[in-house]
Image (cartoon, rainbow, N blue to C red):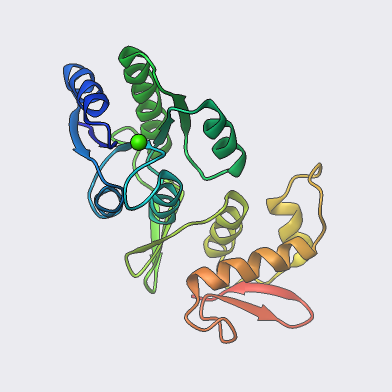
Amino acid sequence: MNKILIIEDELAIAELEKDYLELSGFDVEVETTGDVGARRAVSEDFDLVILDLMLPNMDGFEICRKVREVKNIPVIMVSAKKDDIDKIRGLGLGADDYMTKPFSPSELVARVKAHLARYERLIGTGVRENTAFEIRGLKVDKTARRVFLNGEEKIFTTKEFDLLTFLAENPNHVYTKDELFREIWDMESVGDIATVTVHIKKIREKIEYNTSKPQYIETIWGVGYRFKV
Ligand code: CA
């Protein structure tokens, strides 16, 4: 059963959302303060979070940011003010959906179902076999497109993930920046081989203990990069 966390300080609204979601078969919990809600969203195993914007102790912006640091689960942000919704949309906080209060509970249930279905397709729950590999504490889950270092998730952009995966799946092979650019970025993409350098730097910041002595992606001076196994 999918577990949903509602972080909402208006209890009447939270209870209404909870009732409708439970009738649709979801397991629902409610928190009414931002700090406790954030702590539970980050540390517990929820499948989706419904997040009010204005909350006591910590606002929805901050909570969304904290959740996104560690999780890819769908986040639906709600606010009573249409202006706020437009503003947060523009901020690119990483919420998956935005709703303006008041909304019909059945609309909320429909969106929750759609986001969970999309998320489950993304992580391939119970459908495809998980293709993951692990190298000295660095685990790359190709199905879910998630990266963990010693069990701690590191958030990767699409290109960073593609680049790391390509290098790791072709270990001990030295690739030039040109080759990597052609491999990972399509012809239409703006940018040049300096993009490769920037992405390698960002990947190292996420997975290397010491970025000046990288243990995964080595720089071969004057040539390119190599993934060491
Ligand atoms: Ca509120």
Taking 70 as reference, is 103 above or below it?
above
> Where is residue 123 shown, x and y percent of the image?
38, 40
- Residue drawn where x is 56% and y is 61% of the image: 164
| Of the pair 103 and 213, the residue shown nearer to us | 103
> Where is residue 95 shown, x and y percent of the image?
47, 39
Write down which quadrant ligand 1 falls in.
top left
Q: What number of labels is visible?
A: 0
- Residue drawn where x is 40% and y is 59% of the image: 133
In the shown orientation, is residue 216 left or right of residue 184?
Answer: left
> Where is residue 222 shown, x and y percent of the image?
79, 80
For residue 29, which quarter of the picture? Answer: top left
| Of the pair 90 and 155, the residue shown nearer to us | 90
List the single residue furthest toward the bottom. Answer: 213
In the shown orientation, is residue 53 left or right of residue 205?
Answer: left
- Residue drawn where x is 53% and y is 26% of the image: 82
In the shown orientation, is residue 115 left or right of residue 43?
Answer: right
Taking 41 as reference, is 49 above or below it?
above
> Where is residue 83 shown, x and y percent of the image?
56, 30
| Of the pair 182 and 197, the residue shown nearer to us | 197
Q: Quadrant of the N terminus?
A: top left
- Residue drawn where x is 78% and y is 45% of the image: 189
